[in-house]
């Protein structure tokens, strides 16, 4: 038992990204506590409002049978979950049939950022101590991973995290295509609605730095990052890719929706008054992320579209696939300066 326990702690601390850490935590709790359901809930804060996402959930459906439930927004969070997040206290509710529901808070920098929910038979004292200890290990490790994955200035995901996240996303798409390969109708639908990648770059940012100084430049980057976080979906991944360059990986959607979204965001930037700077604009390049793509190919395609937007007036976004179809750029052209790590 002790050896197994040590191995589980080693397994948890071996993780190098938050998603895998959550899998390890849930598997370990299930193995040692024996629950009916274990979930991770996170406050992903949209526009400053408490917004709860069920990040991962394991449901026991039979003897040695499990079901993993993937990421979803919780439209109506239970009162106990909200109390746990607000008070940073463990909340326990016991029903008459002896089933216990327990919510354990996870804090980072004195803020409750998540809660672990456990549904189980009544837990004895040693099991409660162990459950609490697993949550504290998770909490400590979460702080380290969070710092590793985030850009210090803007708090967005950093460039080093990009490759890992996009590989995971492409793998997921490949699995989806395979799972529906017998149903051609469904397959067509999935191709119509794929993920997208956008590279955004501030126009003439060098002028802002030169005219008003780097501190003002940093403030502009910070405000733009906040605008992106509030404007785009919480499930879209936003990276600070380099100095004044940002990458967004969008959840699957069709071309029209993504173009509308980008047009609205460019308008939002035009309408925003940044400190000192008036009329700041951005340019962007978009590319479809197809299953079987290499991350470098997608980023190069979006970069070519961005390059085209920059050379054709700025303050606009261009879609790589449209530029190719209209023969405005060449597939073979290799003028990208993107260097992945
Ligand atoms: N303040 C600040 N500036 C940065 C940071 N990282 C990069 N930069 C600046 O970003 C500027 C990028 O300039 P360029 O690549 O010439 O591009 P640009 O002036 O935006 O022009 P276009 O992209 O062609 O519209 C340089 O002046 C960099 O010093 C940062 O973290 N903070």
Image (spheres, rainbow, N blue to C red):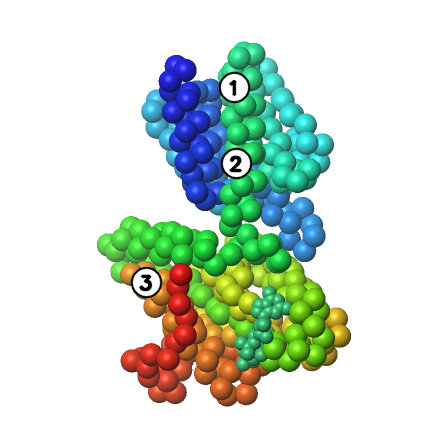
For label 1, the crowd category at 10 Å Cα-Cα, with few meaning under 14, some 14 to 19 and many 20 or more, is some
Where does residue 164 sit, x and y in percent of width and height?
40, 52
User: In what element is the residue under mark 3?
Assistant: loop
Q: Is residue 317 above or below residue 225?
A: below
Residue 80 rendering spot, x and y as whole percentages: 66, 30
Q: Looking at the image, tell me whether mark 2 or mark 1 is earlier in sequence order.
A: 1
Indicate which disc residue 141 carries: 2
The Cα atoms of the two marked residues, 3 and 1, are separated by 42 Å
Question: Where is the C terminus found, in terms of image quarters?
Answer: bottom left
Structural crowding at the residue carrying mark 3, measured as other residues with C-alpha within 10 Å and reported as few (<14), some (14–19) or many (≥20):
some
* Secondary structure of the residue carrying numbered label 2: helix
What is the x, y in percent for residue 188? 32, 64
> What label sits on residue 130 in the rendered view?
1
Q: Of the numbered discs in the image, which one, if any, rests on residue 294?
A: 3
- State the SS at label 1: helix
Q: Which of marks 3 and 1 is nearer the N terminus?
A: 1
Residue at 65 percent across and 25 percent down: it is: 91
């Amino acid at each position: 038992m002790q050896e197994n326990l040590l191995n589980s702690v080693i397994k948890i601390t071996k993780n190098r990204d938050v998603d895998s850490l959550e899998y390890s935590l849930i598997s370990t709790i299930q193995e040692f506590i024996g629950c009916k359901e274990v979930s991770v809930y996170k406050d992903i804060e949209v526009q400053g409002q408490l917004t709860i996402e069920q990040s991962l959930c394991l449901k026991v459906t039979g003897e040695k049978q499990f079901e993993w439930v993937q990421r979803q927004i919780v439209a109506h969070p239970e009162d106990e979950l909200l109390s746990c997040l607000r008070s940073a206290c463990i909340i326990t509710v016991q029903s008459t049939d002896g089933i216990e529901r327990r919510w354990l808070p996870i804090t980072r920098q004195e803020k409750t950022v998540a809660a672990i929910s456990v549904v189980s038979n009544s837990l004895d004292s040693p099991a409660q101590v162990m459950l609490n200890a697993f949550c504290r290990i998770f909490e400590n490790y979460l702080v380290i991973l969070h710092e590793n994955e985030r850009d210090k200035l803007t708090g967005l995901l950093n460039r080093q995290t990009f490759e890992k996240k996009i590989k995971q996303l492409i793998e997921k798409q490949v699995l989806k295509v395979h799972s529906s390969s017998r149903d051609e109708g469904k397959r067509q639908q999935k191709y119509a609605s794929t993920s997208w990648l956008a590279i955004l770059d501030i126009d003439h940012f060098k002028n802002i730095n030169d005219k008003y100084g780097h501190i003002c430049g940093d403030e502009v980057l910070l405000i733009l990052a906040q605008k992106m976080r509030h404007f785009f979906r919480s499930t879209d991944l936003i990276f600070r890719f380099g100095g004044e360059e940002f990458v967004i990986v969008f959840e699957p959607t069709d071309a029209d929706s993504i173009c509308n979204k980008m047009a609205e965001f460019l308008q939002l930037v035009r309408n925003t008054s940044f400190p000192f700077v008036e009329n700041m604009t951005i340019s962007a390049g978009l590319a479809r992320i197809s299953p079987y793509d290499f991350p470098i190919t997608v980023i190069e395609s979006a970069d070519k579209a961005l390059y085209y937007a920059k050379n054709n007036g700025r303050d606009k976004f261009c879609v790589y696939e449209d530029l190719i179809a209209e023969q405005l750029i060449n597939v073979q052209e290799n003028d990208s300066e993107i260097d992945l790590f």
